[in-house]
Image (spheres, rainbow, N blue to C red):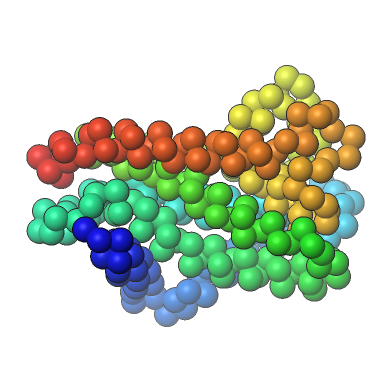
Amino acid sequence: MWRGDYLYLIQNLVMKDFRIRYRNMSLGVLWSLLNPIVMMGVMTFVWTKIFKDGRPHFPLFVLCGMVPYNFFTIAWSGGTTSIVDSAGLIKRLPVPREVVPVSTVLSCSIHLLVQVGLLLAIAIGSHVVVNKYWFWLPVVWALEIVFVSGLSLLTAAANVFVRDTRYIVESTNLVMMWLVPVFYDFSLVKDPYTQIYDLNPLAALVIVMRRIVYEGVAPNWCSGCAEHHTLTMWKLVLASFSVFFIGLIVFRRFKPMFYEHI
């Protein structure tokens, strides 16, 4: 299959997934805005009124964590079930199997774009200064897409043989809500748990997003941090591409056996 054919196939799969997701929904894509707005409001009330967090611009602070987290959970869950859900297409047409999980993740990128628009609007509304470090944001979002695509290739292959995989992924997503600094600051995490957070690419995504948008500093800059904490961006690059290539290798190793199991 030619490169142009791959792009055409991915484009059609992305649009198909997007249309199916919002079929028969009265609000359509506005659900991508409604969910983070409601969660942002709830988190802001709990942490500023009940726990009395005096942090300025708390809605922006929490949204910097929610946007990458929401995309991660939706895209990973959808990518995990993509092969089984597309069994009819795979059996009828000789499509490259790798394209299916990746296109599912890319279709969720439309939600990411909508929520990123909300994030930037809240940032500007909070009078946060737009600076040169915002040029890092497309790189950060691209790395998250690469990372989730790699995870989806791994779990999509596993889900073909062990259908409980989707429930493991859903449970992991719930746990990640607390193990990633979505609504609390990374500075609250103390040793020896900081080393565990250093191994979590999703936590790195949230930390880098906050540094750029909320703090207005370079993604690898951290005041008062140990030297290894200033390498967050480069660890994110290494983790994202490592996970992607591992997922691709594992997926290709097992895909000849997909047909008889789906």
- Nearest the viewer among 45 and 213 is 213
Residue at x 88%, y 57% (from the top left corner): 56
Outermost residue, bottom direction?
26
User: Does residue 42 show up?
Assistant: no
Which quadrant of the figure contains the N terminus?
bottom left
Which quadrant of the figure contains the C terminus?
top left
User: Does residue 68 show up?
Assistant: yes
Q: Position of residue 179 (x, y in %)?
A: 62, 35
Q: Is residue 167 left or right of residue 213?
A: left
Look at the picture and state if 148 lies above or below 31.
Answer: above
Residue at x 80%, y 73% (from the top left corner): 125
Q: Is residue 179 left or right of residue 161?
A: right
Residue 9, image quadrant: bottom left
Residue 61, image quadrant: bottom right
Look at the picture and state if 195 lies above or below 119.
Answer: above
Q: Position of residue 101 (x, y in %)?
A: 33, 51
Q: Position of residue 156 (x, y in %)?
A: 31, 42
Q: Position of residue 165 (x, y in %)?
A: 33, 36
Q: Is residue 236 left or right of residue 109?
A: right
- Nearest the viewer among 90 and 181 is 90
Residue at x 10%, y 40% (from the top left corner): 260
Look at the picture and state if 128 lies above or below 240.
Answer: below
